[in-house]
């Protein structure tokens, strides 16, 4: 007989002595063992329970399914009017075990004797603690905000010996920022699971899931079921990080590392709304590498790619405030969004970029190129984001027409 099953058998006999019904099921809800008190509580099952057979539906509906808290309690009203306390515990690698206690006097046991008093709280707690010791999760009983009992599993989970935690505040199990959350959950009687960082005895922290249950027969004791979810939490964090990286890739030009057209469109709309709300100027710069096609024809596309990367680096070096955005607009064109920037300051930044770009080719002067820049400022030059883009493009066209290698701010044509 497996050790876990042997332990359950011994426990069933102990509970038999205090008229607590006991029944254990495997992971497929097949009956493993039961005691006499269980049969006395449910005489309709006498002679119909067999090892290895599926549990009767009337019993299965009272036993929490897979995925429930390792320890769960509930109160059930039977068809015959009896009230039953049910405590169910997950037994790792085996299945689930349940204890059943009638809450009314007069329970007959095999017709042999009658129990006239309700089972004392101490007797119930003794059986419950035996169940807690079989659970792979850590179980703690909290009374008046303090740890009254902690199962031995806490040492494997958090490195504490149960006696080191007895009498301490329940919140001491958790990191300081999560302790108040647990205290509030206990005070409010919350039943939904909590995720929190628990304090390990070695000073580190572990992510745990905590489920709260009122211990039968109720009245002052809360049961905490702590399950280690560190691996699951790490996987979730990795997934979130991968999602952020994927989102960043979706908004990044792979050649230059600058923002792509999609990111530019989103950024322009966001900054336009902020410009309208705050009443501060918004500048849009459009850069175009002069004679870029000739560079590709004379030195090859790798040289053209390198020129694009160098211009992107120059733009990032000058547009470095939190709201600034440098993006590859398309081909050899780049756009820079400069929130809360006056027109004169924007022209100065554009000219610095032009100088930086030429200087970046000191190691290969034969490939050096210049850039032309168009500048438009809202709200002075445009009444919408689309118009601001059009005005910057018009200014860039004028810079090209006037001989390239220059910066031109949009003005109404004469």
Image (cartoon, rainbow, N blue to C red):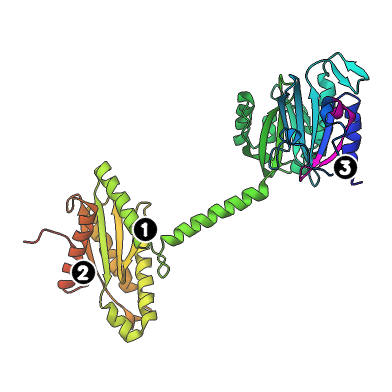
Q: Is residue 239 above or below residue 165?
A: below
3 or 2: mark nearer the eye: 3
Contact? badges 1 and 2 (CB < 8 Å) = no
Cα separation between marks 1 and 3 = 61 Å
Q: Give the secondary structure at mark 2.
A: loop
Query: Dot 1 surroundings within 10 Å: few (below 14), some, or many (20 or more)?
Result: many
350 left or right of 171 in image:
left
**What are the residue bounds of the magenta stretch?**
25-40
Circle on res. 5: 3
Of 54 and 5, nearer the camera is 54
Question: Residue 400 placed where, x, y %?
Answer: 19, 72
The nearer-to-camera label among 1 and 2 is: 1
Label 2 Cα neighbours within 10 Å, binned few <14 / some 14-19 / many ≥20: some
Identify which residue is drawn at 38% across, 76% down.
305
The disc label shown at residue 263, or none: 1
Q: Is residue 84 left or right of residue 319?
A: right
Label placed on residue 406:
2
Q: Nearer the viewer, residue 296 or 350?
A: 296
Q: Position of residue 66 (x, y in %)?
A: 70, 42
Viewer-closest of 159 and 109: 109
Q: Residue at x 32, y 49 (%)?
A: 270
Task: Tell me where residue 366 sits by quadrant.
Answer: bottom left
Side (left or right) of 86 relative to 276 = right
Q: Earlier in the sequence, mark 3 or mark 2?
A: 3
Q: CA distance from mark 1 to mark 2?
A: 27 Å
Q: Are marks 1 and 3 in contact (CB under 8 Å)?
A: no
Q: Using the numbered discs, state the Cα–Cα distance from disc 3 to disc 2 in whole angstroms.
A: 85 Å
């Amino acid at each position: 007989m497996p050790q876990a099953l042997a332990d359950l058998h011994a426990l069933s006999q102990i509970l038999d002595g205090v008229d607590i019904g006991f029944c254990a099921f495997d992971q497929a809800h097949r009956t493993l063992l039961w005691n006499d008190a269980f049969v006395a509580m449910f005489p309709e099952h006498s002679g119909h329970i067999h090892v290895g057979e599926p549990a009767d539906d009337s019993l299965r509906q009272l036993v929490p399914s897979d995925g429930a808290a390792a320890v769960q309690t509930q109160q059930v009203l039977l068809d015959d009017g009896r009230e039953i306390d049910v405590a169910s515990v997950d037994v790792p690698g085996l299945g689930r075990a349940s204890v059943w206690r009638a809450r009314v006097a007069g329970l007959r046991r095999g017709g042999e004797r009658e129990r006239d008093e309700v089972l004392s709280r101490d007797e119930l707690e003794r059986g419950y603690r035996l169940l807690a010791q079989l659970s792979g999760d850590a179980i703690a009983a909290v009374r008046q905000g303090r740890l009254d009992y902690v199962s031995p599993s806490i040492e494997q989970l958090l490195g504490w010996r149960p006696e080191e935690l007895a009498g301490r505040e329940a919140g001491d199990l958790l990191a300081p920022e999560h302790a108040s959350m647990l205290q509030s959950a206990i005070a409010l009687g919350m039943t939904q699971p909590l995720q929190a960082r628990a304090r390990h005895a070695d000073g580190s922290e572990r992510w745990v899931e905590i489920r709260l249950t009122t211990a039968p027969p109720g009245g002052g004791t809360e049961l905490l079921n702590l399950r280690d979810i560190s691996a699951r939490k790490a996987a979730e964090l990795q997934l979130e990080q991968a999602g952020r990286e994927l989102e960043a890739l979706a908004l990044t030009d792979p050649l230059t590392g600058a923002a792509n057209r999609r990111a530019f469109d989103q950024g322009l709309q966001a900054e336009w709304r902020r410009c309208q709300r705050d009443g501060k100027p918004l500048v849009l710069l459009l850069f175009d590498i002069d004679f870029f096609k000739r560079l590709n024809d004379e030195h090859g596309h790798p040289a053209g790619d390198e020129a694009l990367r160098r211009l992107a680096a120059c733009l990032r070096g000058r547009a470095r405030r939190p709201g600034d955005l440098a993006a590859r607009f398309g081909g050899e064109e780049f756009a820079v969004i400069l929130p809360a920037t006056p027109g004169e300051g924007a022209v100065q930044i554009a000219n610095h970029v032009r100088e930086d770009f030429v200087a970046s080719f000191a190691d290969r002067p034969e490939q050096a190129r210049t850039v032309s820049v168009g500048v438009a400022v809202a709200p002075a030059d445009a009444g919408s984001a689309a118009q601001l883009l059009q005005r910057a493009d018009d200014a860039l066209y004028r810079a090209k027409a006037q001989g390239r290698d220059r910066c031109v701010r949009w003005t109404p044509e004469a």
